[in-house]
Amino acid sequence: MARVYNFSAGPAAIPEEVLKQAQAEMLDWKGSGMSVMEMSHRGKEFMSIAQKAEADLREIMAIPGNYKVLFLQGGASAQFAMIPMNLLNGKTSADYINTGAWSKKAIAEAKRFCEVNIAATTEEGRFTATPAQNDLQLNSGAAYVHYCPNETIGGVEFPYVPDTGDVPLVADMSSTILSRPVDVSKFGIIYAGAQKNIGPAGMAVVIVRDDLIGHADDKVPAMFNYKTHADNESMYNTPPTYTWYIAGLVFEWIKRKGGLNAMAQINERKANKLYAAIDASDFYTNPVEIKSRSWMNVPFTLANADLDSVFLAEAKDKGLVTLKGHRSVGGMRASIYNAMPEEGVDALIEFMRDFEKRNG
């Protein structure tokens, strides 16, 4: 069977080149006689994989030397708790910007540990916009400011990096990491679940500034303390070795493709094409304000919701899969991460136009 164009929000498509390399190395990684998933995480073979993956990520993201890069289990959701556990450092409150479902989950978890100040929320507008910098009600005494630059479910993306002064900025970049260059020095912590733009599910990448490590309360379990993982190069326990390996192959693929500047050009072009097709139609609608539209997750609704199931079935027949929108939003959602080739977006647009002609 031919491979489909997979528009899943996550676990998401992985570059075909990466999958083929992993396939070729499945039984025997570089003459070791072992699959990567069989290797000891402390053996020289896997240690070389881990070290190269970190070095490549540091290179493509231009991560400064005063940041640690951690490869951790628990996905991004574990970070919702680890952040207040590690960053409160004697303070009793933190600022959160609420722009969607993942912001709300992070807020709910933080409330277990501290007072949460909602610096801004777009919930009244059904999370179809981002707040402006001037709208942020920040507390200078907060331990940190948390936000989600790209909300996967709502397809809402910040067009700017919030200025939080001397208060550390924490970003859940699960859906937007590696899609374009980012100035890491503007952040105290960047974290991201792997299953969108990095690799398979089962891991989170955490980029944390050195001065924010080592302040967890003594009651914080070792596995939830950043210092534990920083001191042990993410190998305090057995890490998610195969996900780490695939992530390393993805980092190599990004380098071969020209780095994050090249990724940004392709991703912007893909998104602009799809939004242009939606905006030119009376049959399809995107609810997000133009300046806050995501490059990575494009939700859209049909003029007649009764046609949703027909649209999905016919799209699947054309090799366009996983387009159903999240249950909280409805309609459709096309996630067009780095691994989605431009031809996939072109094929979706062609199908959408044909479907509209026949059903509009």
Image (cartoon, rainbow, N blue to C red):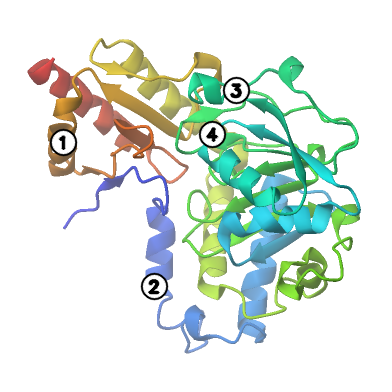
Q: Nearer the viewer, mark 4 or mark 1?
A: 4
> Is mark 1 in CB contact (under 8 Å) with mark 2?
no
> Which residue in the structure is indicated by mark 4?
100
- Dot placed on the residue nearer the N-terminal end, 2 or 3: 2
Q: CA distance from mark 4 to mark 1?
A: 26 Å
Of 246 and 154, nearer the camera is: 154
User: Residue 48, position in %: x, y?
Assistant: 66, 75
Contact between marks 2 and 3 (CB within 8 A): the answer is: no
Residue displayed at 80% across by 37% down:
186
Q: Position of residue 118 (x, y in %)?
A: 70, 32
Sequence-wise first label, 4 or 1 = 4
| Mark 2 surroundings within 10 Å by alpha-carbon count, few (fewer than 14), some (14 through 19), many (20 or more) | few
Q: Amino acid at mark 2?
A: Ala
| Residue at screen point 87% across, 37% down | 167
Instruction: Return the residue at label 1.
Output: 309
Q: Earlier in the sequence, mark 1 or mark 2?
A: 2
Precedes in sequence: disc 4 or disc 2: 2
Which corner quadrant of the image does residue 1 belong to? bottom left
Proximity of marks 4 and 1: CB atoms separated by less than 8 Å: no
Q: Nearer the viewer, mark 2 or mark 3?
A: 3
Quadrant that contains the C terminus: top left
- What residue is rendered at 79% in x and 41% in y? 94
Q: Quadrant of the rendered structure where residue 22 is?
A: bottom left
Query: Which tag, 3 or 4, sits closer to the chain's start?
Result: 4
Q: Earlier along the polypeptide chain: callout 3 or callout 1?
A: 3
* Badge 3 amino acid: Thr
**Which residue is disc 3 drawn over?**
130
What is the crowding at mark 4: few (fewer than 14 residues within 10 Å), some, or many (at least 20)?
A: many
